[in-house]
Image (cartoon, grey):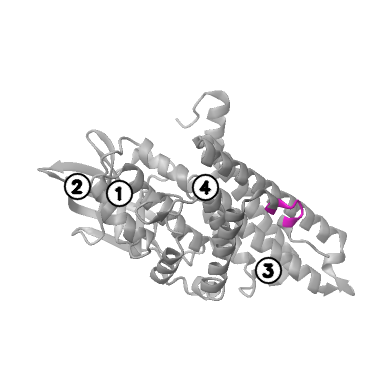
Amino acid sequence: MPVAPLDLLDLDDLLTDEERAMRDLVRRVADDAVRPHVAGWYERGEAPVRDLTRTFGEVGLLGMHLTGYGCAGASAVAYGLACLELEAADSGVRSLVSVQGSLAMYAIWRYGSEEQKQRWLPGMAAGELIGCFGLTEPDHGSDPAGMATRARRDGDGWVLTGGKMWITNAPVADVAVIWARAEEGVVGFAVPTGTPGFTAREVRNKMSLRASATGEITLDEVRVGDDARLPEARGLRAPLSCLTEARFGIVWGSLGAARDCLHTAIAYATSREQFGRPIAGFQLTQAKLADMALELQKGWLLALHLGRRHDAAGLRPEQVSAGKLNNVREAIAIARQCRTILGANGVSAEYPIMRHANNLESVLTYEGTSEIHQLVLGQALTGVSAFA
């Protein structure tokens, strides 16, 4: 009998009962709340983000790897498996959860005051409040050190001026974690989005992540008190540490998109007949499927290794870069190859492959392009920076 791609090596045996239970729970949630509707969301370029956030909050997915404040305190591996199952449904839906938990919530949890944590985190964990993370700017993507957004002291508060671009959740967010340059260096703020001068315009006409709310933030003399500043965030290392946290979810999540493409291609190949037999019976098709299944399992083992390291001792940034570089690169290659097995049907919205492939084009770029992660690894290997 045929086996599922991830069952070739009995990889499930490497998981604990608790991890398998979490994976199965998230798979059921994705099957119920996302899969029946996501093709329509993608076609329309919109998704019911608030409804999804509440659904995910009810089952403890938001900030699930954090502790306290209503967060589940799950392991890094359990969080990774959740990301995989969410992205198997859609990368945009996984992005919603990643940005909420690993960027916005993590920034407040790691660098915020106790008052900020109490104000924001319980509601965000429950899905009642939505957060976004404002680091990328229109002219500063791969080089956040060049950010033009400024924070200047004004009496006992601050005035923020500038703009952020490609910010997931921004159009629907209740709180925005904003990074700006001040006299003392890069500082972070938890800014209520209803503050005068704060506007978020939804980015339209995307060809990728269409089931995700993406926005452009404008900060026009936004005045906040000093109680909005994240007191433990000092320098660019703070937002970069948040990105490292979020990239770990991508290491796992990208495999979900690849797995869904491969499942679809196998099902299609075993039912589609040409020249009098299923195309799964042709050697070229089987060679494609075998190579893709192999890369998927190798990526899964890499993700699991990084997850175990994360839980035991933490991860260095270059280790996360290795995971994101490899797994996203292989995932998009799998999606493209699966598309060839479906032929013309591969571009039809009746099947998820082209949606996954388009989404992975964004995943390949955001939170560090492949080239940036290559340079991170190069610096780790040589001790020489090639960034400047």
Q: Judge the density around disc 3: few (<14), some (14-19), many (≥20) Cα neighbours within 10 Å.
A: many
Mark nearest the camera among 3 and 2 is 2
Q: Residue at x 31, y 51 (%)?
A: 177
Disc 2 residue type?
Asp
Disc 1 residue type?
Ile
Position of the C terminus, as image quadrant, is top left
Q: In which quarter of the image is residue 234?
A: top left
Q: Which mark is residue 346?
A: 3
**373 and 76: which is toward the camera:** 76
Q: Judge the density around disc 1: few (<14), some (14-19), many (≥20) Cα neighbours within 10 Å.
A: many
Q: Which residue is drawn at 25% across and 40% down?
A: 231
Do the residues under discs 3 and 1 have CB atoms within 8 angstroms? Answer: no
Q: Where is residue 14 in the image (x, y as percent from the top left)?
A: 67, 48
CA–CA distance in space, label 4 to label 3: 34 Å
Q: Residue 178 carries which label?
A: 1
Give the SS element for disc 3: helix
